[in-house]
Amino acid sequence: MPTSRRGGRRRPQQSQNTQTPTVDVHVADGVRLQKVLAQAGLGSRRKCEELISEARVEVDGQIVTELGVRVDPGKAVVRVDGMRVQLDPSKITVAVNKPLDMISAMSDPDGRPTVAELVKDRPERLFHVGRLDADSEGLLLLTNDGELGNRLAHPRYEIPKTYLVTVEGGEVYPRVIKQLTSGVDLDDGTARMDKVRVVDAVPGRTMLEVVLHEGRNRIVRRMFDAVGFPVARLVRTRIGPIVLGDLKTGRTRVLGRTELGTLMRAVDL
């Protein structure tokens, strides 16, 4: 099936006269598709039947329009309007606004505060995807979905991350921005930012929004150090399609169905 440049599946073209799948995705001892969709939060059973009848539901890459189709929710890949639906209710992904001086780990032998403290009341066994340094703040994702976590961390998918960075050293001139986007030589190779723009400036300090998909240790700080503008504050505001928004420091929220679907699409799930 064709895919878009960003990895999302295009909605297949189907003849209006076609009423049954070309490939049989029916599992005799499975669960009715409309029930599976309803349990995944797509709406009432009646609403989910309408989604199927309107040819908006795919199972394993095949449009399904029959209401009697049964599927195995533990194995089937189901999409609605091209967006993957998480069918396993035990799998969650949580957005965290990591505070300053907290480490991105689920435990620490030295007794330092960890992000595990922010989700200590949740029953799931979560792990962090990527990390933020103790002296950095902002968006971090925790999940118990191993496949999603592995893909988000894999450099193949080049998930962009956005930061608000306050630097010292005065005004950041266009030539410096060009250097950051063209390439900065570091001790472990050249690094480039995808986008850099000035947000605000006061005497002695400049705030910038930067986007990059590099995952090397302390890469943002090292790049700004290399061009003579040490970082005073760094806040991650976005990971791929997931935005920090108005989530307060130290608080968490479980990603909703649409957010999770866009995140899964970003890593070709």
Image (cartoon, grey):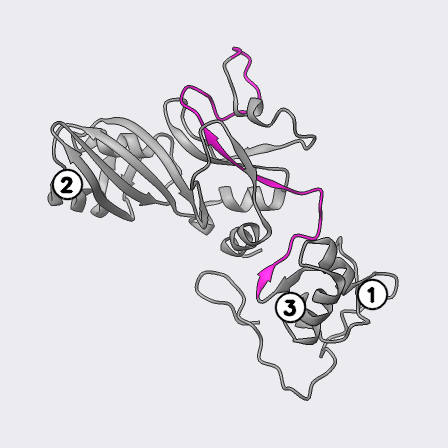
Q: Residue at x 57, y 24 (%)?
A: 116
Judge left or right: residue 210 versus residue 248. left
Q: Quadrant of residue 71?
A: bottom right
Residue toward you, 206 or 42:
42
Pointer 3: residues within 10 angstroms few (<14), some, or many (20+)? Answer: some
Q: Residue at x 34, y 39 (%)?
A: 163
In the structure shown, which secondary structural element does the residue marked by tag 1 occupy?
A: loop
Asked if residue 20 lies in the magenta stretch, the reply is: no
Task: Identify residue for label 3.
Answer: 61
Q: Residue at x 22, y 39 (%)?
A: 184
Sequence-first tag of 1 and 3: 1
Q: Does 32 appear above or below 16? A: above
As drawn, the label of residue 59 is: none
Q: Amino acid at mark 3?
A: Gly
Main secondary structure type of the part rendered in magenta: loop
- Calculate the distance from the C-alpha at mark 1 to the C-alpha at mark 3: 15 Å
In the structure shown, which secondary structural element does the residue marked by tag 3 occupy?
A: loop
Task: Identify residue for label 2.
Answer: 176
User: Where the N terminus falls, by quadrant?
Assistant: bottom right
Q: Quadrant of residue 77?
A: bottom right
Judge left or right: residue 187 versus residue 65. left
Q: Amino acid at mark 2?
A: Val
Q: Which residues are magenta?
A: 82-111
Task: Identify residue for label 1.
Answer: 27
Where is residue 27? Give x, y as percent.
83, 65
Judge left or right: residue 101 versus residue 29. left
Where is residue 227? Give x, y as percent.
17, 33
- Calculate the distance from the C-alpha at mark 1 to the C-alpha at mark 2: 59 Å
Residue 166 seen anywhere in this rendered image of the structure: yes
Where is residue 7? Give x, y as percent.
49, 61
